[in-house]
Image (tube, rainbow, N blue to C red):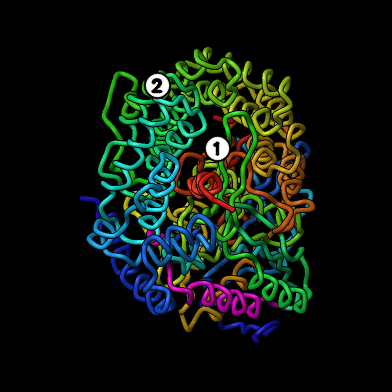
Amino acid sequence: MMFLRLFGAGFVMAAMAVLLASGQQETRLRTTTHGVRIDALVSDSGGPVLGLHSEDFEILDKGVPQRLDAAEAAGHVAVALTIDTSLGARATSMRTYMYEMPPESFSSILRACDVLLGALGPGDLAALVAVADRVVPLVPLTRDATAWRQGLVQMQGLPARAAPLATDGRGTIAFANETDGLMPQLSAWDGALAAASLVARDSGRSLVVLVSDGIDDASWLSLEAVSRTLADLGIAVDFVQTSKRRFHYGVATPEDLAKKTGGIVYNTDDSKLPEKFRERLAYLRQSYVLTYEPRGVATNDGWHDLVVKVKGRNVTVRARPGYYANRPVK
Amino acid sequence: MYRGAHAGRLTFVLTALLSAWQVAAAIQPAARLSFVDLFHEYRSGDADRAVQILSTWSPRQIDRDAKLPPGQDDAWAKAALALFLIEALRESSPGATDKAERLIAEAYDRAKSSNDTRLLTFCRDWYFVGLTSHVHLSMDAEAELRRRFSADPLTQLELGKKAERYLEVILHPDRDGYALGFGHTEVHGTSSHGPYGEDAAKAEHAYRAALALDPTLIEARLRLGRVLWFLDRRDEAERDLSQASREAMAASAPTLVYLANLFLGELNEERGRVDDARNAYETAIRAHPVGQVAYLALGRLLLATGRDEEGWTAIASALNGSTWARQAPDPWRVYAMDDTNWSSAVRFGHLRSQVRQP
């Protein structure tokens, strides 16, 4: 087990270089009825710039200067580890031939989860969520490594199949024998948003990590709706994929969700997965959480351009370009 | 040609061969059973085992040996054998289904002539599984249903659902259409309504026919409303969805109330009526509080309109008290997956229960 290992400063620098070079947007913005929250990363040629205070920042909301209420370093990361437990990841039955995946797939998913949890720092938190045709929280947001381990053990014991069911036209749902389950039923988009709710209100930096071999086939929410919502709130979805996975031409994959939310894609069998994830966490911890009460601008007029700067310093600020204020839904 | 389909078929063939070998190895002694014994096992003994054994037989062997004993070929026996055969085919690679199709047609003819409504329903449901499962019938099950059961409201509902499935695939390219039984390249033609117009028109026609035959078939009205929304006939859609909601409430069918209001919420969102959408989602939640999707829809709506705290609270409510055992699949997932291979397991189970003999 590799829980609670410390990370090195070198990884932080390497992560910064990689992420800045790749142009990832690494900010979070949350609007509420009372205020606006922005996650911003400040860096110079030497890496993240630390020790800044609210008076160091300049915020323009629709061109109108705003006074920050607070500017705090995120300090820690709250991770919602969202684990695909669907039939697709665990199928061995003949009947599931179109979705058949090697049984090793689920094992590799669980191994990767172990690695990811082992990469968390002492201050970081994690929640464990199982996702298939339903979304089930297994471990609440906690720093308790023992609870994480128990969650992974519990994950292995979940039923491998979903019960097939049908309606009779009048609202009665008939269930068949659970062993007759035929479909993988992964609601990845729904699961990502549900998982985000476990970390979104934490004071640290929120991150959803989806570990899966699959593709979405059961969500109510669309990829577009979930990715736009999470991106607007600055919550990234990282995706850890198995080496062998389902793919159908023209069908969106969880990589698309990662791409649209500023997340990163990893592979379960990557020997450098622990280092890469530690670097990712270190990067996220360096972000600032900026909050302010909008003044001099409307609060229900749609899109607001945002400019975030650091006064008198030649630094790079990575912040979202704007937010919607009570915007129309579609 | 769709490359995923190639991969799927290749996987299927390889898996079928492996599975057949494994089954054969596991049941070697039983493989010497005569067909009569096997059929008896299917109807009165371990039916799963009988199906597994028959699934290892070659089409030629089935054609030669799968016969009813003289004097024991009544209509129900023929229907039972027709079911046994396609259950076995469902377990193995695609094979000749002619014999099963012939048997069920004979059973249907006898049921019709003797006015055996129970057997007629069995035959209809047999065609339903032919329509929805991965058993590749030689015949056109849809055409057979239209020919034999056009006056049956549930048949019309099934035909409507089959057409509606194509709409889901077209409109939700971010979901895997293979879960619904086909790929995105297999959808039907175009019309003035857009690329899905032909299927939408078929679905609308079928649902209206179902309602004309049985106005109390609430799911048909619910689905009709959703199809009309697909066709951008939003006022009509709203009327039918609202009526479905009212009727479902009166009939104490909470899952249909849930679905009607989920769809009404979506429709209202699209029309920019945020408060109406919120009310609809909240009605859905009240009707079926253990459903997760309505909480997610409501939460996303609130987040999208800047009400973060309420939004996250709604989404978190989807998870409150949820455990794997307690959290049944959401009615939306049932709606989306009904009339697919997934639900055919239910139908196979129901059909089998009718041909079992103590």
Amino acid on which the number 1 mark rests in the picture: Tyr
Assign the magenta stretch its main secondary structure: helix
Residue furthest left as drawn: B1
Q: Position of residue A69 (x, y in %)?
A: 79, 49
Residue under the image location 57 percent in, 79 percent down: A111
Q: Position of residue B31 (x, y in %)?
A: 38, 73
Q: Is residue A159 above or below residue B99?
A: below
Subunit that carries the residue with mark 1: B
Q: Is residue B133 above or below residue B128?
A: below
Q: Is residue A63 magenta?
A: no
User: In front: mark 1 or mark 2?
Assistant: 2
Residue A297's label in the rendered image is none
Please rate how many residues cluster around mark 1, counting C-alpha atoms within 10 Å: few if below 14, some from 14 to 19, many from 20.
Answer: some
Magenta range is A97-121
> Alpha carbon of mark 1 to alpha carbon of mark 2: how far?
23 Å
Q: Is residue A98 magenta?
A: yes
Amino acid on which the number 2 mark rests in the picture: Ser
Q: Secondary structure at mark 2?
A: loop
Subunit that carries the residue with mark 2: B
Q: Could you tell me how many numbered marks the image carries?
A: 2
- Quarter of the image with the C terminus of chain A is top right
The residue tagged 2 is B150
The residue tagged 1 is B335
Q: Secondary structure at mark 1?
A: helix
